[in-house]
Structures are given as structure tokens and as C-alpha cells.
Image (cartoon, rainbow, N blue to C red):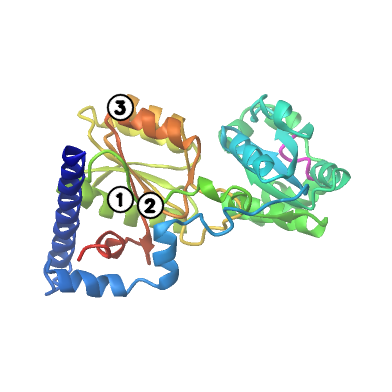
């Protein structure tokens, strides 16, 4: 026991020293005079709001014990494990799930989990509204990725032929071209159509708050100085990329951008970085958009993300605390540990990686 306590004590000292070193780097870079003394760190910690301090301790504890008491929650399910995780969370809280799987995307396992199940084309919005109303699901969430690249394939719209409601919704985007086809534009239009039909689109974290990533180094060692510089640099780029509603992910090494995400998605962005940087050891930064609508398109990390990083040779994944969905947390962290990949989660501070959030606990 004494050996364990000694090890933990040394670990805490090491982490605090690294936090102080990070503050020192930040102060030098910003020409601040506070250095790395403890009182300066405490002053920086005071600048964080009580709400952010509460979120930092556990961003998902608010509502964590919420029960749904037999309410039916609708899930419009895209690709990946995220819809499954949300459905399981709803059922743990005593709710029922009515799931509509998007054709060519959703996992077949959803059918066995659902209390009511159907499938739908991505543009059949009238059918979506009718299905959820039939099953008395007034609150729904959109979980899982829609591969926009598949929608650009030949004949894709024949498989996802819009109904009249979908046609009215998408007409300005694909026919008259009076509106653009960025994610925020399309998803906002869909949510407005659902709302007009009496269906409220809610954030998935309303039903599964435990999926949010907390702050800290979740797996691996604290990032070294070069990685911290890359993380800070990549964070700024990723936030700007998100502000333009292009993507959420940036890959950097030695403060040089290797790849940025667009329509291809996070995994292909990471793989492209691996092809361009054969030496590996790069940093992947994935964050929420500054204008992020929490109802949809939240940054999501799963085992597939880590598989792409390992295959491409990356060493550090940086995500945004409180605004990133962590799917299959145990599997992700175990995979990262076995692969030697560090996962670090930080809060945002007006478009910057929050140095304060790292340093506030140092005394």
C-alpha cells in the first residue's frame, strides 16, 4: 500500500509540474509577467466561472440520474455506434425507443434494441414525422453520421428519394440553389421542418449525458512540450475550420497543418495525414464548432477514430471537454492504451485551448 501511495504521490507531482511548465510556456508566448509561480496559477484559476469549474469536475453529472419514466424517445439513426449508445442510455433510464434507421447507414443491431423500428431514406422527412408521431415520440434526437460522400454517388437520390415534405425542405439547397449545402444549413433546415411538424429535436446528451468527455488526460502521459504547442496551434485552426462550417478535425505536426477535414470525414482526414507524414507522431485535434448546435453533428470519438490514428502513425488525440461524444469509452481507452496513443481533453476559452483549465488545480 505504501508503494502505491508513493507512486500516486509522485504521479501527482509530475502532473502538477507539467501543468506549471505549460503555464510557463503560455506566459512566455503571450509576454505575460506571471511566470509559473503558484499564486499566479491560482489567479488564473479564479478567472474560470463556477459553472465551468462544475463542468470540469464532471460535465455530465447534471441530469445524470434523470429518469424517462416510460416516455418514448425517437432516434433518427445514422452510421456508427453512437445511436446504439443513446438507445441503451434511454432504456437504462426507463424510457422506450422508437428508432428510424437511415438507409445504407445504420447498424442492423438497432432493430433488436428498438421498441419500434423502421427504415427511411435521408430525404423522406414526412415519413420521419409520421413515424415518430405514430409512436408518440414527441422528443427525438439525431445520432450517427450521414456520409455525404454517399449522397454524391450516382443514383444515390433514387435510394433516398425525397417525399413532398423533403422536397419542400431541400428545394432551396439542391434545386433553386438559393441556399448552401453546409452541414449547419442542411441540418438546421431539417430540424425546422421537424419542429413545424410537432417534433422537437433535442441534443443526444439530454438522454445520454454520460457520453460527454470530461477534462483531463484520459489515456497516456501528459503531452510533452512539442505536443502541447501542436495542440494549441491545431485547436485554433480547428475552431476556425468549424466557424466556416467545413469540418471539425485538423492534423498537425511541428505546428504545420498536415490535413484538414471536409466532406470526407475524420477518419479519411487522419489517413491522408498518415500518407503525407510517413514519420508519424502527429497530433489530431477534433473540436466543436464555435457556433455548435448541440442538437446535431457533435464531435464524436469511437474505436474507429483510434484505429485510424494508429494505422496512420499518430500519437496524440486532443478533444474538447464537455462538447465531445465518447462512444464505447472503455473500448476506446483500452485500445488507445494498447496502441500508445494519448487522449487529452480540454475546455475551450474563446477559440483557444484553455490553459486556465489545466492550471486551475495547481496550488
Q: Residue furthest right?
A: 134
User: In the rendered image, is residue 178 in sight?
Assistant: yes
Label annotation for residue 238:
2
Magenta stretch in the rendered image:
120-125
Give the position of the N terminus as an image quadrant: top left
Residue 213 position, x and y percent, is 44, 48
Label annotation for residue 295:
none
Question: Is the residue under label 1 in contact with that under label 2 (CB below 8 Å)?
Answer: yes
Q: Secondary structure at mark 1?
A: helix
Label annotation for residue 234:
1
Q: Residue at x 14, y 55 (%)?
A: 17
Looking at the image, residue 160 sits to the left or right of residue 82; the answer is right
Q: CA distance from mark 2 to mark 1?
A: 6 Å
Looking at the image, residue 137 sits to the left or right of residue 248; the answer is right
Q: CA distance from mark 1 to mark 3?
A: 22 Å
| Label located before the other in sequence (3 or 2) | 2
Within the magenta stretch, is there residue 41? no
Q: Nearer the viewer, residue 142 or 219?
A: 219
Label annotation for residue 339:
3
Q: CA distance from mark 3 to mark 2?
A: 25 Å
Query: Which mark is nearer the camera, 3 or 2?
Result: 3
Image position of 81 with respect to 296: above or below = above
Looking at the image, residue 156 sits to the left or right of residue 280; the answer is right
Q: Secondary structure at mark 2?
A: helix
Q: Residue 162 lies in what quarter of the image?
A: top right
Amino acid at each position: 500500500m505504501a508503494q502505491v501511495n508513493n507512486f500516486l504521490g509522485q504521479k501527482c507531482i509530475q502532473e502538477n509540474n507539467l501543468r506549471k511548465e505549460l503555464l510557463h510556456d503560455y506566459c512566455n508566448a503571450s509576454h505575460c509577467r506571471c511566470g509559473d509561480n503558484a499564486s499566479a496559477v491560482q489567479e488564473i484559476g479564479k478567472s474560470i466561472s463556477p459553472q465551468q469549474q462544475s463542468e470540469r469536475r464532471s460535465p455530465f453529472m447534471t441530469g445524470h440520474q434523470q429518469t424517462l419514466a416510460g416516455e418514448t424517445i425517437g432516434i433518427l439513426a445514422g452510421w456508427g455506434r453512437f445511436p446504439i449508445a443513446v438507445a441503451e442510455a434511454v432504456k437504462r433510464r426507463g424510457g422506450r425507443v422508437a428508432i428510424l434507421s437511415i438507409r445504407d447507414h445504420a447498424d442492423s443491431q438497432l432493430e433488436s434494441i428498438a421498441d419500434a423500428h423502421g427504415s427511411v431514406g435521408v430525404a423522406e422527412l414526412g415519413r420521419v414525422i409520421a413515424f415518430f408521431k405514430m409512436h408518440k415520440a414527441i422528443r427525438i434526437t439525431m445520432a450517427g453520421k450521414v456520409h455525404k460522400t454517399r449522397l454524391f454517388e450516382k443514383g444515390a437520390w433514387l435510394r433516398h428519394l425525397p417525399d413532398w415534405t423533403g422536397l419542400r425542405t431541400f428545394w432551396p439547397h439542391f434545386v433553386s440553389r438559393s441556399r448552401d449545402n453546409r452541414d449547419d444549413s442542411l441540418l438546421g433546415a431539417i430540424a425546422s421542418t421537424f419542429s413545424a411538424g410537432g417534433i422537437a429535436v433535442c441534443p443526444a446528451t439530454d438522454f445520454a449525458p454520460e457520453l460527454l468527455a470530461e477534462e483531463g488526460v484520459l489515456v497516456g502521459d501528459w503531452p510533452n512540450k512539442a505536443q502541447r504547442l501542436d495542440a494549441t496551434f491545431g485547436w485554433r485552426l480547428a475552431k476556425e475550420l468549424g466557424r466556416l462550417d467545413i469540418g471539425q478535425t485538423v492534423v498537425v505536426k511541428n505546428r504545420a497543418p498536415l490535413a484538414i477535414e471536409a466532406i470526407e470525414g475524420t477518419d479519411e482526414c487522419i489517413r491522408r495525414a498518415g500518407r503525407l507524414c510517413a514519420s508519424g507522431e502527429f497530433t489530431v485535434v477534433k473540436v466543436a464548432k464555435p457556433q455548435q448546435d448541440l442538437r446535431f453533428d457533435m464531435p464524436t470519438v469511437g474505436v474507429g477514430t483510434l484505429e485510424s490514428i494508429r494505422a496512420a502513425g499518430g500519437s496524440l488525440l486532443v478533444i474538447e471537454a464537455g462538447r465531445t461524444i465518447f462512444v464505447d469509452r472503455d473500448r476506446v481507452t483500452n485500445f488507445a492504451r494498447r496502441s500508445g496513443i494519448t487522449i487529452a481533453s480540454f475546455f475551450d476559452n474563446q477559440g483557444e485551448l484553455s490553459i486556465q483549465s489545466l492550471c486551475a488545480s495547481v496550488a
